[in-house]
Amino acid sequence: MLTIKNLHASINGKEILRGIDLTVNAGEVHAIMGPNGSGKSTLSAVLTGNPLFTVTQGEVFFNGKNLLEMKPEDRSREGIFLSFQYPVEIPGVSMANFMRTAINAHRAYKGLEPISASDFLKLMREKKELVELDSKLASRSVNEGFSGGEKKRNEIFQMAMLEPKLSILDETDSGLDIDALRIVAEGVNKLKRDDNACVVITHYQRLLDYIKPDIVHVLYKGKIVRTAGAELALELEERGYEWIKQQVDEE
Amino acid sequence: MSTEKTYIELYQQFSHAIQKPCAPLLNAPRDAAMDAFIRMGFPSSSLEDYMYTDLSSAFAVDYGLNINRLSIPASPNDVFRCDVPGITSWVYFVVNDSFYIAPHQPALPEGVIVCGLNEAAEKYPDLLKKYYNQLAPNGEVATVAFNTAFAQDGFFMYVPKSVTLAKPIQLVDIMRSDVDFMANSRNLIIIEEGAKAQFLECAHTADGVQFLSNRVTEVFVGENATFDYYSLENTHNKTTNIASLYLRQATSSNVLVNEIVLHNGLTRNDVKIDLQGEYCQTMLCGMAIGDKAEHIDNATLLIHAKPHCQSRELYKYVLDDSSVGAFSGKILVAKDAQKTEAMLTNRNLCVTPTAKMKTKPQLEIYADDVKCSHGATIGQLDETALFYMRTRGLSEADAKLLLMYAFMADVIDNIRIDVLQERIRNLVEKRFRGELSKCTGCVVCK
Ligand SMILES: Nc1ncnc2c1ncn2[C@@H]1O[C@H](COP(=O)(O)OP(=O)(O)OP(=O)(O)O)[C@@H](O)[C@H]1O
Ligand SMILES: [Mg+2]
């Protein structure tokens, strides 16, 4: 589904990603872990086409298409979704209006008619229930005045609305209380299918207790330095990153 | 002074023709106003109040004037489809400066008068004597003096004591001519003690020639009265629209002014609101949407003369392409006006690097026990929000549209007529979508 080869990216001339190789197949759940500032969010920003970052080398293919040539909106319409580490507040734009415009853009891309008002309301209701999102939140401006946890839940709500093929969850667990974590994780699991995939960026095992990764990567200084099974996350939880940093810095 | 000379000579030469069709009350202040105009000349950008908008060059065009009041071929209903249909039961037209009543109007409540200004001056001399030309600052503002000298007709509305108008009154101003044309029409509105009225004035252009409309409106709002004044400009790019509103509020009155410039050429809106009684409430707001080379200048003055009044002022601009916006807003709190609450806000979005906005909010406070604030911002669209929206599949254009629209939302929220609010929402959205990049029914704008 997703193939990243030797990806280098920089911001303001400073190189952040320094040769990433990663393949994600349909049906898989990948976890990306790594110390603060190692480039995890940068990777998700580059994959979604954030104009702040410049790709200097490498290539990314998504279902056979050259992702790096696509506009951010087309990447979304092709099925890429990012749950932001820091969701953006948009005062004055209602969630409903935002989601209707998004859904209709996705539909137009597939050559479909705009969604009817009643179907849209039904869809909203259904997906709100999935992540147990408070109805009041859905009638407010996008993320405006939402608590940290509400923002994260709202990201998964949007994911549920758009049904992406590849979801990248950037620290969706941060800011969530224990109950919210379970609800959000269950939501993600309910959306899991054989034909979609998920990349979970996290610092903690507790999210991975719910969303079981097939493969765990460690990103450090802009490179994937370790890749293993779910047991790697447990080991990191126990031992921290120092030992990996040391090994890598010695190499 | 060559531009002025043409008009001064015109005035002197046709003085008799100007006065002939008019009631004595309209003629009385002409000569003094002309003298004031001669002293001042058209305002150029060398004057502080016109720093951003040079009006003298706008008058340099060789406009025709209809001093002899030849009737206009075509009835307003034929040339015009209104942007906000169906919101009112009472619709009136001023074509250039001539008053028309739309057909099939229901009767007005007892005592309410709506007619042409000249007709009012003939029929209700007592009212006119008391109110006409009482607020217009002929000695200070050249375009107002010019209007007073040349004005022959316009709109008159009188709502007597304690009468409530159940529906808004709508006035549709249309500029209509086969040659480049100027009109100086004049409005007078009197809302007596305890009366309630809502008024909507739309400005339009019906032909592809150059127009200059120099309109002066005087409004008196009595004690405990409530008055809404909405203006909506949708004119073509070859229009110069100078609209000057002078409004006086008496004790405990409640006034909302909302001036919306949707599409235009060169616009200068002056608003002066004088709070001459205690416990007045005033909401003054406006929005401007500019693109191409459109130019919108709002100059406002709010005077807190008496204690215990509250005012809020909010103007917003969204400027695209090479459009130019200017805002100067002044709040003056007199020495006696203790316990004044006044808030002045101007926020602007420049969508392109070539769009220009100039803003000058001012507070001048002589009282010591007041709560006043002012603020102005000029910004661009929020790139982070744009990217976020695009990651959800919205095109860049749709994302921008939602942001621009959201930016204007609070000005639209300040419309106290539900159907009008809905309609303006719709028009603003269309405007941002580019579907209204021409004024409705337009032949001029590209
Ligand atoms: N806009 C920016 N300007 C300059 N440097 C930036 C910018 N955004 C990110 N960086 C730098 O890029 C590096 C990687 O940041 P990134 O956000 O990708 O890290 P991360 O792995 O997601 O960290 P965390 O676990 O704290 O979320 C950091 O050194 C950061 O300071
Ligand atoms: Mg991060």
Image (tube, coloured by chain):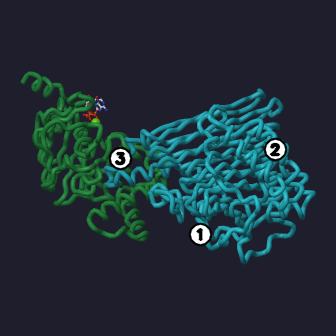
Residue B182 in picture, x, y percent from top left: 67, 54
Which residue, as the protein is rendered here, is positioned at the far right?
Answer: B126
Distance, label 1 to label 2, CA atoms, is 36 Å
Quarter of the image for residue B194 reads bottom right
As helix, strand or loop, the secondary structure at mark 1 comes to loop
- Specify the amino acid type for callout 3: Tyr
What residue is drawn where x is 26% and y is 38%? Answer: A41
Colour of chain A in the rendered structure image = green
Identify the disc placed on residue B33: 2
The chain containing the residue under callout 2 comes to B
- Specify the amino acid type for callout 1: Arg
Residue A232 in picture, x, y percent from top left: 14, 38
Same subunit, tags 1 and 2: yes
Q: Relative to B100, does residue B182 appear above or below in the rendering?
A: above
If the picture is divided into quarters, which one holds ligand 2? top left
Out of B148 and A115, give the one closest to the viewer.
Answer: B148
- Specify the amino acid type for callout 2: Ala
